[in-house]
Every structure is written in structure tokens, then in C-alpha cells.
Image (tube, rainbow, N blue to C red):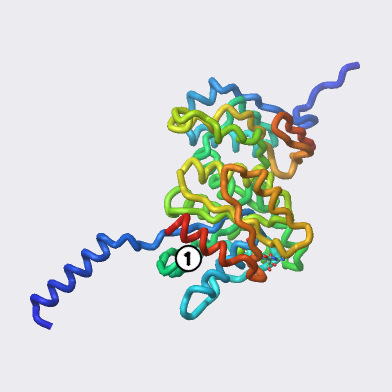
Amino acid sequence: MAEVKDPHDGVQIDLISGERLANQTSMEKIRMILDGVREGNIVILEEGLSPDEESRLIEVTMTEISPDEFNGIEIETYPRSEATDASFLDRLMGRESTKKLTVIGPANQIETLHKDETLIQTLVSRK
Amino acid sequence: MGILTELKSSISRAASTLFSAEDPKRIGIYGPPNAGKTTLANRIARDWTEHGDAVGPESEIPHETRRARRKENVEIERNGKTVDIDIVDTPGVTTKVDYTEFLEHDMEEDDAVRRSREATEGVAEAMHWLREDVDGVIYVLDSATDPFTQVNTMLIGIIESQDLPVLILANKIDLEESSVQRIRNAFPQHETVQVSALEGDNMDEVYDKIAEYFG
Ligand SMILES: Nc1nc2c(ncn2[C@@H]2O[C@H](COP(=O)(O)OP(=O)(O)O)[C@@H](O)[C@H]2O)c(=O)[nH]1
Ligand SMILES: [Mg+2]
């Protein structure tokens, strides 16, 4: 007989399209990410955040850390190695920094096993 | 002093501050926890300020520095010219803080919780300084550890997006496991200078580069 699925048995993964992110303000994006991660979800952004948004994400994460409740986040993106040869216009528009698949999860549940330019391997444990 | 001379001297004082090219540049010392940022800041302060006071305590326990600390008007002399900078020693940037890690350093739970709260405030503050209040960055890395971390990549990306001049220091070259080349490979777009902040090795080149980058 098939078991009834309990959401607490597994790990929820939110895959968020670039299109959906494009219509949000920086704070909306950060709120959505942290709300998901604080519930124990893994949030995957198709197109990542701008450097300024990453900086704010770190800042807001810090203000929300609290003992025995939330330890912060683990975040992985593909390295920005091609940033140096982005065209002048791309740099001007800040375009070099986006379109990077980004994985974000709760620091106490996610561990990066391996990472290189083309692969991110992550171990996710249940709460 | 006559009122006219007084006026004249105050005008020339105002003018000299207005037009002085020597307004100190505020240089933020950034990098992950335990890279040796405070050790470097203290060495710079000791080498170039009259009283040589330390900027802050150095420690092998992460997050010893939990407030950005500023040392003003550090005048570095290079080739007959003086470069005037304010150095800002910042808490090491991270995306997570777990107070139970401090318990391993023989700390009471209360102290560990307080330390982690201060650490998170400090990191938030350091991010804020980076967006608003620094004119240049010295990015310090422990050359005995893997530089290719998410926090380093992200921070360098944030610094680049602000168009701030950045000098990368490969610190702790006195350690056997040190590899400067590994840092050069991770950030080929920037110049990396090797140093031992603890032992004072190669500080001359560091001061040359500070003058070149931030002068
Ligand atoms: N071997 C070695 N140890 C260093 C060097 N610079 C700093 N340290 C040590 O690394 C630890 C962390 O230094 P600290 O300046 O507090 O790091 P911060 O967290 O980046 O401010 C301390 O135990 C320092 O003595 C260095 O050049 N060589
Ligand atoms: Mg420090």
C-alpha cells in the first residue's frame, strides 16, 4: 500500500525562473529567498542575483540569524569567471553578473560536496 | 590676531581643505574570518602612526573583530610622497554564524550567544560600509586555505560592481601549506601581493602597492 506523503518527510525545492525574478524588486527577491530557506527549502534561482542584491542578502541574513533557530544560509553559484571578458555594454548595464544559476539553502542542512565551472554537487539533509 | 588676518587665514584653511588632493582615502580591509585582517591593520598602524596603537585584538577564534574599526590619518611615505589613508578593519564576511562553534573555544553558552549576535551585526555593518563608505579595498586571504569559496567570489564580485580599486593580499606565506599561485588562479583579474602580516615579510611591497592603488 502506498504511504501517505508527509511534507516533513522530504526536502522542498523551489525552482524560480528568471522571468519570475525579473518582475520583483530586490527586497521582494530577498524576502522570497529567506522565507523559503527559513522553512527549510532549497531555493534555486535560474538567473541569480546582482552583486548589489547579494550584498543585501548577506546583510538581511545576518539580521535574521538567531541561536537555535536560524544559522544563516549556504549559497552557491557558478563562478563569474567570464565577467572579465564581458563586453563594455554588458558591464555598463551590470549584465555580466546575472544569469548565474544560484542554489541557496539553510546553512545547517546543506553542504557543498564539489563545485567547479560546470557542476555544483550538494548534499541536502532533512531538518 | 587682527580680524583681517584671522579671516584670511581661515579662508586659506578652508581653501586648503577644499582643494587638497590629500583627503584621506578610506580603505576597507575585507576578507573571510581569520585571514589576518586585524593583524595587518595593526601592523600598518604600528609602522606608520606616531603612537603605533593597535587597531584591535587579533585572535585564532573566528569573529574576534565584531565592529568595523577605523584608524584615521595613517600617512604612508613612498618615494618622497605621502599617501594619507584611513584604514577600516572589518569583521570577516560570512553567510552563516553558528554560536555552538564558539563553545568549542571554551566559551560559556551566554558568551557564545552574545558573541554570535555581535558577529552577525558586525558582518551586516561591514556590508553596509562596502556599499556606502569605502574608497578602496584590501582583500586579505589566508594563502594556506582554498581561496575558491562562494563568499570570496561573491565579495570580489560586489567590490568590482562598485568599481572600487582592490588589492588582494595572499597572507600567511610563512606557513608551509601556503600557495600564492592558488589565489592568483582564483582571481586572475586582480593583482595579488604575498605577505606575512604576522612576521612582517614583504610589507615594503604592500606599502608600494597601497601607494600605487590608493594614493
Ligand atoms: N602564520 C601566520 N599567522 C597569521 C598571520 N597573520 C595572522 N595570523 C594569525 O591568524 C589568526 C587570525 O588573525 P586575525 O588578524 O585576528 O584575523 P582576522 O579575523 O582576519 O582579523 C591569529 O591567530 C593570527 O595570529 C600570518 O601572516 N602568518
Ligand atoms: Mg579581525
* Residue ranking furthest to the front: B79
Question: Residue B118's quadrant in the figure?
Answer: bottom right
- Res. A32 in view: no
Residue furthest to the bottom in view is: B1
Q: Residues within 10 Å of mark 1 (few under 14, many from 20)?
A: some
Locate residue A106 relative to residue B17 in the image: left or right. Answer: right
The image quadrant of residue B194 is bottom right
At a point 65% along the width and 29% down the height, the residue shown is: A44
Q: Which residue bears the numbered disc 1?
A: B70
Chain bearing tag 1 is B
Q: Is residue B70 above or below residue B163?
A: below
Residue B63, position in %: x, y? 64, 61
Label 1's element? Answer: strand
Return the residue nearer the eye: A39 or B42.
Answer: B42
* Image quarter hosting the N terminus of chain B: bottom left
Against B3, residue B210 (above or below) is: above
Residue B168 is situated, as x and y percent measured from the top left of the image, at 58, 53
Query: Does B139 appear above or below A3?
Result: below
Q: Is B204 or B94 nearer to us in this picture? A: B204
Looking at the image, which residue is at 52% across and 51% down? B166
Location of residue A96 in the rendering, given as x and y in whole percent from the top left corner: 53, 31
What amino acid type should be assigned to the residue bearing mark 1? Arg
| Residue at 61% from the left image edge and 28% from the top image edge | A45
- Return the residue found at the far right: A1
Along the line of sight, which residue is nearer the eye, B13 or B58?
Answer: B13
Q: Quadrant of the C terminus of chain B?
A: bottom left
In the displayed structure image, the side of residue B2 where residue B97 appears, left or right: right
Residue A63, compared with residue A122, is above or below; it is below
Seen at 58% across and 62% down, the residue is B66
* Residue behind label 1 places its C-beta within 8 angstroms of ligand 2: no
